[in-house]
Image: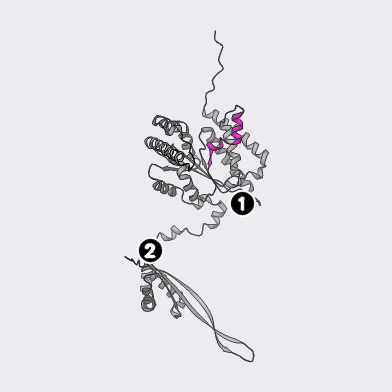
Amino acid sequence: MPEPQPPVRTSTPELEIKDAQLIFRTAWESLVRDFGINNLRFPKELILLGGAPGSGKGTQTRFISNLRGLTCDPIVVSSLLNSPQAQKIKDSGGMVGDKEVVDILLRELLKPEYRDGAILDGFPRTTVQVECLKLLTHQMNELWRTHHNTPLATQFRKPIIHVVILFVEESVSIKRQIQRGKDILRHNEEVRETGVGTIQEVRATDLEEETARRRYKVFKEQTWSALTSLKERFFYHFINAQGGIKEVERNIERELQYQSSLELDPITFDLMRDIPLAQEIVIHARQELVHRLDAYAMDNQAMFKEVLAFAEQKLMPVVQRHAITGLAIINTENALLDSPEAMAMLLDVFSERGYRAVVDLHRIEIPERFDPQTGEITCRTKKVYRIQVRFAGSEIRRG
């Protein structure tokens, strides 16, 4: 009679969540014990970069770093699993599972070079890792709230989590994987022949179409659901990565445009909110300019005509002489500009005609009288208006 077999544990979402809570709590308590709670300073911004094989994660990482102003190298989770800490686990016969990945990653994130932000390539990949990420975000927010009104406030900032998914269809993924394999083989052959360069590692999945297809299938079955579940909690950016490099870069830039309401500390944003955004003030700028010019002509026509005559007779001859450079600088002492309304009229006229005009007032003290008995010098103030008029200059073509 065969011996009874132990029951096989069936993985369920409930069990996975409990595992995640246990895994994260163990890792967090280890961090507190080793570093101290006031030294758990995580990146302000985390960009979780995911995507199918051949979607261009490696190609676009540097572009995303430059776009977000990050100077540190990305954290590639697969590389962390080759770290001395992970190797020690493997050498002892252990497996690098979710528990080890979370523990190694949390310690990596505490390094000073990631303080302003970091790109995470390859995390999370499982439901347990997704839950651990949520728990980490909760703890980071708690650290921010705890230290908000303390001298350490600038060291514990409100975290921002972006999920950037580069998506390509199966056919595109397979084609790119195979092409990548061919390119690496060609490169390695040149290195062997010339002795110049470094041999690159080629993935086995990049050599055969069937293995490339299997790798894409594994991504869709095991990683895709974990990544898409993040949209319920974090800023989620689904990027069409099937086009050329420049097209994908434009898609990424459009998705990751700076938004002060998301990235500034709430107190900072509230203090600044009364200053309008540039895009807000330009929306109706043209209509408002037209309205002002019509009002000048109807409500104060005499001054408006005087301003137009001044611009036409005194300023435009100088501007026309600078048609090549596109910049004219004119000094004038005309008292007409002492009137703020006349100044506004002049600037609006130039704007309507397609010029960019700026007027600066310079006050110069001119000696008029000298008292030889007291040595006192009496001066008068001369007001000089310096008008800068910019426009698109002429292009001189030389054959």
**Few, some or many residues within 10 Å of mark 2 (<14, 14–19, 20+):** few
The quadrant of the rendering that contains the C terminus is: bottom left
Q: CA distance from mark 1 to mark 2?
A: 42 Å
Q: Is residue 142 visible?
A: yes
Label 2 sits on what residue type?
Answer: Arg
Label 1 sits on what residue type?
Answer: Thr
Q: Is 4 rendered above or below residue 156? A: above
Q: Is residue 148 visible?
A: no
Q: Position of residue 285 (x, y in %)?
A: 40, 63
In the foreground, 343 or 209: 209
Residue assigned mark 2: 286
Which residue is at a point 50% across and 79% down the rendered structure image? 383
In the foreground, 287 or 67: 67
Q: Is 335 rendered above or below residue 391? A: below
- Looking at the picture, the colour scheme in use is one colour
Q: Position of residue 9 (x, y in %)?
A: 54, 22
Q: Is 14 rendered above or below residue 388? A: above
Is residue 77 rendered magenta in the image?
A: yes
Is residue 45 rendered magenta in the image?
A: no
Q: Bounds of the magenta span?
A: 71-93
Residue assigned mark 1: 154
